[in-house]
Structure formats: C-alpha cells, structure tokens
Image (cartoon, rainbow, N blue to C red):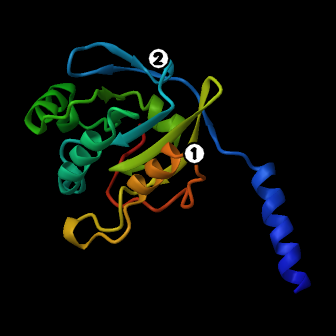
Amino acid sequence: MGKFIILFLFLTVSIHLYPQKMVGDFTLTNVGDDSPISLYGCEDCKAVAIIFAGTTCPYDQYYTGRIKELITSYQDRIRFLLINSYSEPEESVESMKAYQSRLGYSVPYLSDKDQIAMNILGARRSPEVFLLKKVNDKYAIVYSGALDDNPQLPGAVHKRFLKDAIDKLLVGQEVEVSATRSVGCSIRKK
C-alpha cells in the first residue's frame, strides 16, 4: 500500500514539475490566398488544431474524409490549420493549391517549406496532429499524435483521439490521453 501512495505522490508532483509544452508563435503563408497566417493571430481562439498533411502521402488520403468531418463539426468552436512541411518537389506550393481545391478544405493550408512550424511543434510525419489550448496569451500542447486508431479503415476506428481531446478541452476537462504514436509518411528534415 505504501508503494502505491509514493507512486501517486510522485505522479502528482511530476504533473506540476513538467507542465504542458508551450508553443512559440510562427507565421506561414496560406496557399489558398497567399495571406500570412500567424498561430497567435487569432486573439479570440481558445484552441487550435494543427494537422500536418501532405499531398502525396497515402495516409493523408485515408484521412481526408475524417479531417473534413472534424473541421465541419468543430470549426465554429476551434481554429483548424493544415500545414505541409515536406520539401520534396512533388509537394510544391502549386500541388498544395490543387490539393486544397480538389478536397475542398475550408481552412488555411499553410506552406512550411522552411520547416519552422514542424520544428517548433516537433512534427515528424503526416498526418500528425497537435491540439493547442490557449493559456493566457500563449498556446500549450494538450494532445499530439494520431487522429484515431485506424488509418486505413474508418469503419473500424475504436478510439478517436483528436475528437476526444477536443471534446474534453471544450468542456474544460483534462485531456486524458495527451499523446499517441502517429502513423503516416515521414517528413524528411532539410
């Protein structure tokens, strides 16, 4: 019994010693209209969902419908940003514009060819998501990883990690699962 009490105290103290990772600001270009979009540019946003998404990765294609569904369900309550950090020629700004137009995403699709946002957030693949909560005038990561537990079969999904995290955040509850392993295509560092 004593071991459990010590473990509980250690975990409680650890939570306070290791706060959520705060995220620095960045500004990237939206390929849809060439406008600059800043993470901190939305003053009344209490949360931001960032999804790293490429144009050629098969895993990004698997998630297209689910991403659109999340955006439709939550875009009036949180801000969504799609980011492409691939530097390969087939992931050009022109291909990003065509991809955004073809899929009909209604949110900014940001070009991160210098991998600024990728490095700030620690993204390694696409699709990979980061849910950020506004803390004072900054943002903290409350969830990072996969959208759900089954990239290839939407009908076989058992755990909707991003949706569950958004739901918890919106009602002011602690996000229970703060990180999962994302499955997708690796984004090669420059």
Q: Residue furthest left?
A: 102
Measured as percent of width and height from the top left, residue 165 is found at: 47, 53
Q: Residue at x 84, y 57 (%)?
A: 13
Left or right of 43 in this view: 107:
left
Q: Mark 2 against mark 1, which lies toward the viewer?
A: 1
Q: Residue furthest top?
A: 35
Q: Judging from the image, what secondary structure is the residue with disc 2 in? A: helix
Q: Residue furthest right?
A: 2
Left or right of 12 in this view: 169:
left
Task: Please say if 128 is above or below 40.
Answer: below
Left or right of 43 in this view: 135:
right
Q: Which mark is residue 146?
A: none
* Mark 2 lies on residue: 41
Q: Judging from the image, what secondary structure is the residue with disc 1 in? A: loop
Measured as percent of width and height from the top left, residue 148 is found at: 35, 61
Q: Amino acid at mark 1?
A: Gly
Q: Residue at x 19, y 49 (%)?
A: 64
Q: Is there any visible trace of residue 182 in the rendered image?
A: yes
Q: Residues within 10 Å of mark 1 (few under 14, many from 20)?
A: few
Task: Please say if 16 is above or below 182.
Answer: above
Q: Residues within 10 Å of mark 2 (few under 14, many from 20)?
A: few
Q: CA distance from mark 2 to mark 1?
A: 23 Å
Query: Which label's residue is closer to the chain start, 2 or 1?
Result: 2
Measured as percent of width and height from the top left, residue 25 is found at: 54, 23
Measured as percent of width and height from the top left, residue 56 is found at: 18, 46
Task: Please say if 82 is above or below 42.
Answer: below
Q: Residue at x 17, y 38 (%)?
A: 90
Q: Amino acid at mark 2?
A: Gly
Which quadrant, please, contains the N terminus?
bottom right
Task: Please say if 90 is above or below 181.
Answer: above
Marks 2 and 1 close (CB-CB < 8 Å): no
* Mark 1 lies on residue: 172
